[in-house]
Image: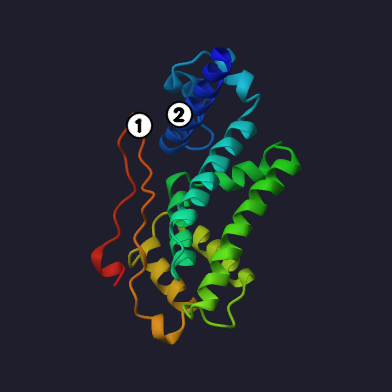
Amino acid sequence: MAERRDALRNRAQLVAAAADVFREQGVGAPLDAVARRAQVGRATLYRHFPDRGALLAAVLEDRVATLEDFAAEHEGEDLLERLMVEMCWYQADVPGLVAAVNESAVENERLAAVTSRTLALLRDAHGVALRRGALRPDVTVDDVLLTTAMLAGVVSAREMPGGGVERALVLLLRGLRTEEHAAAPVPAAQLRVRSTSNPKVLPEPAPDAVE
């Protein structure tokens, strides 16, 4: 039992360390740097994660789990927008994470499971927004996915005029809303990602970008 607790602790430390290292150095950062950050040996790292793809997938799965917990605590009509905002800033936190996972040798079943969980979150939130009149009735789940892909494109561009990501969130989310909700502020991100060893956080949205 003690060995299993140690293994679970080591795995959690590795996933957290990987998020920190990939944030700071990119998704191609040396895996040895992850082991050092987690304060475990290389053998422990490779016992849990045999290759980079497995570790990247674990970071992504951890973030999906965090979004699932977040959704369980926020059941209002703006849940869909809240999820989209959090997903957008997650992409900005570690650019290229999703693409790197998709391009890795991670088994298809694992990728399908992550995709299915993400779709379920958005589909449920989409239904709530429609029922409560916060979303235009012609907006489909596919439209929501298209919007998230567009936001990913903005994130990947890194430097853009006019507020960049914050402004894109305003414009795209307003396009999904009913007229009654069009002028409501964009929800502020709550899952502000912070490195345990390097307290770097994503920039706070400019006040005039979310009005």
Pinpoint residue 3: horizontal percent, then vertical percent.
Answer: 57, 13
Question: Which residue sits furthest right?
Answer: 108
Question: Which residue in the rendered view is the most extreme toward the left?
Answer: 207
Q: Which residue is mark 1?
A: 196
Could you say which disc has been placed on residue 17 in the image?
Answer: 2
Q: Is residue 2 above or below residue 194?
A: above
Packing grade of label 2 (10 A; few <14, some 14-19, many >=20) is many
Q: Nearer the viewer, residue 81 or 79?
A: 79
Which quadrant would residue 38 be assigned to in this image? Answer: top left
Q: Amino acid at mark 2?
A: Ala
Q: Is residue 105 above or below residue 166?
A: above
Q: Which quarter of the figure is the C terminus placed in?
A: bottom left
Q: Residue furthest front?
A: 1
**Callout 1–callout 2 Cβ contact below 8 Å:** yes
Quick check: 48 above or below 98?
A: above
Mark 1 vs mark 2, CA separation in Å? 8 Å
Q: Is 185 drawn above or below residue 181 in the view shown?
A: above
